[in-house]
Each structure stands twice: as C-alpha cells, then as structure tokens.
Image (spheres, grey):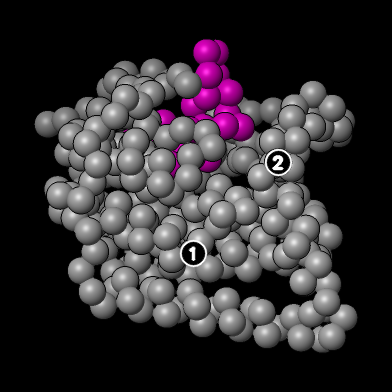
Amino acid sequence: MTVRFAALGDSLTEGVGDPVPGGWRGWAALLAPALSPDPVEFRNLADSGALSRDLLVSQLPAALALRPRYAAVLVGGNDTLRSSFDLESTARRFASALSSLTAVGALPLTACLPDPGRLLGLPAPLARPLARRMRGVNTVVHALSAHYGAAHLHLADLPWTRQRELLSVDRLHPSAAGHQLIAREFHALLAAAGHPVGTAPAHLPVTAPGPGADLWWMATRGTRWVAARSTDLLPGLLTLAAMETRHLLRGSARHLDHTAARTATAITARLTASPTPGPASVPAPSPSPSRSHTPTGTPANG
C-alpha cells in the first residue's frame, strides 16, 4: 500500500540549504521514505518566499487532490518578514489549511519556527519586533496544532545558535546537517506517537560551512536578499525599531510584549472556539511546482 506525503510551505520545506544536483533536497524529502515501511509517494509543493496566503491558494488544492496520509504545513516565517504582517490573517489561513487537510484524513506535521532576528544577530531595536511577531505566530501554531491533532515539532527549540553547523551560510535556513536533524526529529515524534513509520532517516555525510562562508554569502547572495527586503520590510521595520527604542529608553518595552501576547491568545481562542473554513472554501487548484519522491529514495530536485 502506497503512503502519500505532501509538503506545503516556504523555502525551509522546499529544502533551501541542502543542495543536491539540480536543486534542493531538504528535510521533507529526507523524511519521506522513512514515513512507512511501504512505498511513499512524496510531493513537495513548498515554494521559496511563500506566504500563508500562497500556501492556501496555490499549494493546498494540490495537496488535497493527493489525499495524503501525512501533510507538512510549515508557514508563517515569511509573513513576519513583511511590512503587511497581520497575525490574525496568518492564523486564519493556517487554521483553514489544517481544517481542510484533516477533513480529508491527513495528519498534519507542523512546527514552531526560530526567531530570525536572533539567527541573524540583529541589534535589539530591530530584533525585538521580529521576535515579538515570531512569538505570536508560534503561539498560534502551538494552539492550532493541538486543536487539529497535528504532529507538532518544537523546531524553534533545536540548537540552531549553539551549533553553527546546523545553519547554512545565510544563517536563516538549515544546513544539510540541519535538514537531517529536522527529518530525524519528525520521525522520532511520529514513532513515539505510535505511527507505523519506517527506518529512521540515515545520518548522511555533510560539510559544515567554513570560516569565510558567511562573508562569501553576503558578498555574492546576501546583498540581493537585503535589497529585496529593504523595499518591503525595512521601511516598516525601521518604524517598529524607532518605537521599540522609545519603549526601551522609557523602560516600557515589556508593555509591547504583553500586548502582543494577549493579542495572540485572543486570536487563538477565537479560532479554536468556532468552526474554521473547510475544503469548500479553498480556491480552485492553480499550477504549482512540485517534486516527486519514488520508493527508491531518489532525492527530489527543486
């Protein structure tokens, strides 16, 4: 019997940071053959830069058509890195995806995400607003994952900043070793919950980023990433940073934290207390890049 696994999300799930000839591999492709002793059909619908809206509109219809047993849903990080960020909108899209997938019998695989400001080592006035947004998203993800019975991985708690070899040279995505760690952690989580998984993903040989890798990335690719974000995130983030600085100087920064926490809790309460949109509310399928994993274990290319 073939087990179907669909992966939805952004660059983290697409596999950025774990290069193979022709594209990316990533944790989902590494996990796929370990999900069952039977053959696994894997489709990676994740797309670099995807927001929660992209997941709902472009990726979810294809995943529902597959009727998977497992469906990875990791999203929200890119939402926090946009000036248009709205926690309630992100939360409702995430809830709609989980509702739709569980309605067709899929077990969602979800994860909370690490704070990008901490990974990048940003100064406090810039890092704190991003951290506050990420905490809000993670609060929602924790609660909705429990509400829909997802297999939820506390990915944010993995030792990203303590073990540099787990991060790629861009310091935002896992390295090959980091992707392997995520795959093994998801496998262990499913096995502990009694799901009939196969053999755990193997430890593959990897090369850790060298001492000059960060500088080389910034010189060749990092500047393009900064420029792209400067036209969208940076103006809004500078406004947030100015507000943060004023609160830090006044000693009232905790007020912002408490307000954000109360907002996230209220949003979560609303979404777990009332029905969320099911499959009927999902837009019609639209073309979306995908990759397949065959039972032979051939890496998915991106």
Lower position in the chain sequence, tag 2 or tag 1: 1
Which amino acid lies under the numbered mark 1 shown in the image of this protein? Leu
Is residue 22 within the magenta segment? Answer: yes
- The residue drawn where x is 43% and y is 49% is 52
Q: Is residue 150 left or right of residue 79?
A: left
Of circles 2 and 1, the one toward us is 2
Foreground: 23 or 164? Answer: 23
Q: Is residue 250 left or right of residue 48?
A: right
Q: Which residue is mark 1?
A: 87
Q: Quadrant of the N terminus?
A: top left
Is residue 291 within the magenta segment? Answer: no
Counting other residues with Cα less than 10 Å from the Cα at mark 1, is it few (<14), some (14-19), or many (20 or more)? many
Q: Is residue 59 left or right of residue 90?
A: left
Foreground: 23 or 273? Answer: 273
Q: Which residue is mark 2?
A: 231
Callout 1 secondary element: helix
Residue 177: horizontal and vertical position, in percent?
A: 60, 37
Name the image quarter holding residue 173: top right
Residue 156: horizontal and vertical position, in percent?
A: 57, 58
* Dot label at residue 66: none
- The residue drawn where x is 79% and y is 24% is 220
- The residue drawn where x is 75% and y is 38% is 226
Residue 219 sits above or below residue 12 on the image: above
Which amino acid lies under the numbered mark 2 shown in the image of this protein? Thr
Q: Which residues are magenta?
A: 9-32
Residue 133: horizontal and vertical position, in percent?
A: 59, 64
- Whether residues under marks 2 and 1 lie with C-beta atoms below 8 angstroms apart, the answer is no
